[in-house]
Amino acid sequence: MTPEPNPLIVQLADDLEPVRPIRMAHGFAALALATALTIVAVALWQGLWNGPVAGEAAAIFFVANGLIALVGLASARTVLRMASPRVGSRNDGSRWLLAALAILPVTALLLAVFEGALGSHDHAADGLHCFFAGTASGAAVAAALVFWLRRGAPVAPAAAGFYTGVAAGALGSFAYGLSCPFDTVGHLGIWHVAPVAVSAVMGRVAIPALIRW
Amino acid sequence: MIADEATFARLMVATQAGDRRAYTVLLTEAQSWLERYFRRRVPAPQLDDLVQEVLLAIHAKRATWDEKRAFLPWLAAIARYRWVDHLRRAYRLNEDELGDHDTPEVGEEEAVLARMSLERLFVHLPAGQCHAIELVKIKGLSVTEAATRTGQTESLVKVNIHRGLKKLSALVEEAD
């Protein structure tokens, strides 16, 4: 037999209004919009590199940017799912993709060790520019994901902050990477992956306070 | 008899559409479910407050349940989140009300509950952290009493509580 409702329940029921349930599709749409706007902004600011369509880009350009984009998408998906909590939800896929991404900087560092100084053939000065621009380019994605999480009910704020940072850094770096003509593993593996790592740390530190409920 | 998954899900669909009668039944059933869920992990005097906090959270976050997913794992995740938050804020209690409410209950619902239970979170904690949290945050002993009971130094008890709560917080969603 159902017991008599307590006063709080009566009050909450009186306050009830219909709600539109959160839909992952809406989150993906917001993410796609933020990413597209970032790419447009990069195109207007720097112009996109036409090397890939002209057949001038090295294979590593596609591999590195593809991997970075994939990490961004997987992490963003993890974040979108976190807005609707459930027990037993794991993020193993995103973790493995992050491990795969780490192959790029490790390769770059090994090449630096075996072939000489990193800066000599990997454009260190331009690299710093790519690092800062790539990191800043994640702002729109970060804002979209934080907005989404605030609408939702993330029960793992630290993880949500971390993956938001990863997604923002990766998609921002990917967007900016479309304008970058340096297609060596040293450049891409260090300067285009660094925004992911730095954004992950920033997200882990700064975002939990914004999404706690 | 507490509502099952299908009943909860049906009530929640109606709730999201604005059906107040369904919502009253849903919250009443959720209240019973939560009282059982928290029974062994919250001192009795704090149980009502914690259950009410979760009911308020359900109300505020009712749009975050997706009808394509099961209801109880959603409810359990919110309950765990609020529980860890509660442990962080828990003050020392003089009375230890635990232990006499652990009446075993059987059946399919119990099996589902066990899978998502709070006990499962403790499995992932080292024994030292687990004991420190249980004694100080749940049973209400002082740090000094917990140190005597466990053989840990007072500093270690504090460190274990801090690290344990941090780890519990990280496990809220992942541990099944």
Image: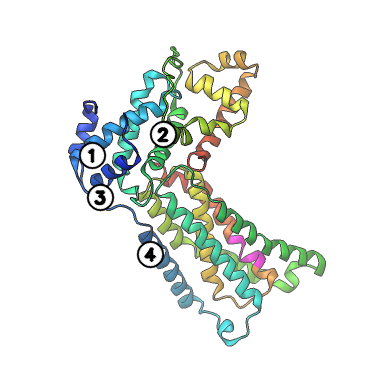
Please report the residue visible at 45 percent of the width from the left and 17 percent of the height from the top. B98
The quadrant of the picture occupied by the N terminus of chain A is top left
Q: Which residue is mark 3?
A: A19
Q: Which residue is mark 1?
A: B23
* Dot 1: chain letter: B
**How busy is the neighbourhood of tag 4: few (under 14 within 10 Å), some, or many (20 plus)?**
few
Q: Which residue is mark 4?
A: A29
* Residue nearest the viewer, comparing A23 with B176: B176
Q: Who comes first in sequence, dot 2 or dot 1?
A: 1
Dot 2 and dot 1 residues touching (CB under 8 Å):
no
Q: Is residue A132 above or below residue A7?
A: below
User: Residue A135's x, y, as percent?
Assistant: 54, 62
Give the number of the disc on residue B108. 2
> Secondary structure under badge 3?
loop
> Secondary structure under badge 1?
helix
**Type of the residue with mark 3:** Val
**Residue A80 location, quadrant:** bottom left
Query: Gap in Å between the C-alphas at discs 4 and 1?
Result: 31 Å
